[in-house]
Image: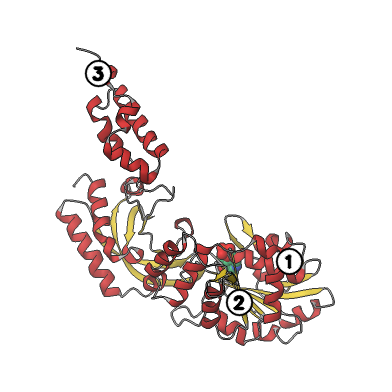
Amino acid sequence: MTDPRRRVPRTDVVLADPRLADAAATIGRAAVKAAVVAAQERARAGQLAPEQVADAAVAALPDTVGGLRPVLNATGVVLHTNLGRAALSGAARKAVVAASGHTDVELDLRTGRRARRGRTALAALADAVPDAADVHVVNNGAAALVLAATALSSGKEIVVSRGEMVEIGDGFRLPELLQSTGARLREVGTTNRTSVDDYEKAIGPDTGFILKVHPSNFVISGFTSAASVGDLATLGPPVVADIGSGLLRPDPLLPGEPDAATSLRQGAALVTASGDKLLGGPQAGLLLGDATLVERLRRHPLARALRVDKLTLAALQATLTGPETPTWQALRMDEPTLRSRTQAAADRLAEHGVPVTLVETQAVVGGGGAPDVRLRSCSLSLPHTYGESLRTTTPPVVGRVEHGQLLLDLRCVPPESDDELVAAVLRVAGRS
Ligand SMILES: *Cc1c(COP(=O)(O)O)cnc(C)c1O
């Protein structure tokens, strides 16, 4: 008998398989070839019969070419930074696809002349916050702050409370970000208490603006006091309010979260916020407020480096004008519905002998927002040893480990994906 390794088919022969040829047209030849080469290697190692190489290559084709894999977020964290924060609504996804070819992003089709970039998305944002005289959009919340600091306070001082010198995450600290623009920070007050007086004493000819940061990812409680935007707005220099999470209006579910409309009404000259936190949209930095200031930001050379692309503009507009976002839905998920979905999943898993229980848990907002809010939730509790296999199956299912158990909270899993999640657990448990 000949050595089967000699019978491993040649790469061009395998690539001629119609299934692989089709795949090359949709996901690219390089990705298909990599799958073929890997299958050939397994055949040479004796792990696969030579006749199975094409089938194995087909089975191993990547399910996406973008590199980013869609995952089921069963963490119970609504805005998980490592999972890309907000999931876009169906409307926003459609808008992104529609905008992905050539679009009229900077062209007035009627006159044939150049038009303001993203004018419809900007108009939607302005409509959503009537208290803002003008609006602008940049890459993210950090970019919004950098643009404000550069345009309004470079070479000058930003007056800010010591209690608001926060680290956003992954080692990025607001003070360092602001100083990188050439602005000087004038820290006032203490970690737990800062009064209007403290600000007033620090204000002078060098003041660029007063910065009010919402310390969004932690809570200070006890002997504390802080000056309000309303108090600060009486002092003279413009007040820039970094509200972080992107709530445009007050939300009774999140009483501790500042919102753009209220901050502006209290006298903030400029509000900065993220697009992909509680607003539930794409990564973006929102700037809302005084028309003269917004125009100064828009005209600053740095604005060009921070501008958003057409996909972001499309997703933002659809988020602002479209139906409720997945973020909104996850935050308000009806408890009995969540419980019955979880119970149904548990029943199906138990039927197949998977060691599962339904447990009471708490979900959080995440994404550095509303740190004191806990949402009553429930989860599937599984052996923690399932964690890695669930993360590496397709689609990946990401849960969280608590008290040595793997918890899967369905709150942020689209209901239509429950079957996929159950199938993934059955596969991982070897019960499918
Ligand atoms: C999240 C956050 C930022 C940073 O926004 P990105 O969109 O992540 O750049 C800045 N300030 C506050 C208060 C935040 O919560």
- Residue hosting label 1: 150
Q: Which percent across, then down, holds residue 270?
A: 65, 78
- Are there few (<14), some (14-19), or many (20+) residues within 10 Å of tag 3? some
Residue 37 at x, y percent in the picture: 36, 30
Q: Could you tell me the amino acid type at mark 2?
A: Val
Q: Residue furthest right?
A: 205
- 377 relative to 278 in the view: left or right: left
How far from the left and from the top, in percent, is residue 202?
A: 80, 76
Picture disc at residue 401:
none
Q: Disc 2 to disc 1, how far (Cα)? A: 17 Å
Whether residue 190 is visible, yes or no, is no
Q: Residue at x 38, y 76 (%)?
A: 323
**Amino acid type of the residue that numbered disc 3 sits on in the rendered structure:** Pro
Disc assigned to residue 135: 2
Q: Residues within 10 Å of mark 2 (few under 14, many from 20)?
A: many
Tell me the distance, in whole angstroms, between the alpha carbons under discs 2 and 3.
Answer: 68 Å
The residue carrying mark 3 is 4
Helix, strand or loop at mark 2: strand
Q: Quadrant of residue 236?
A: bottom right
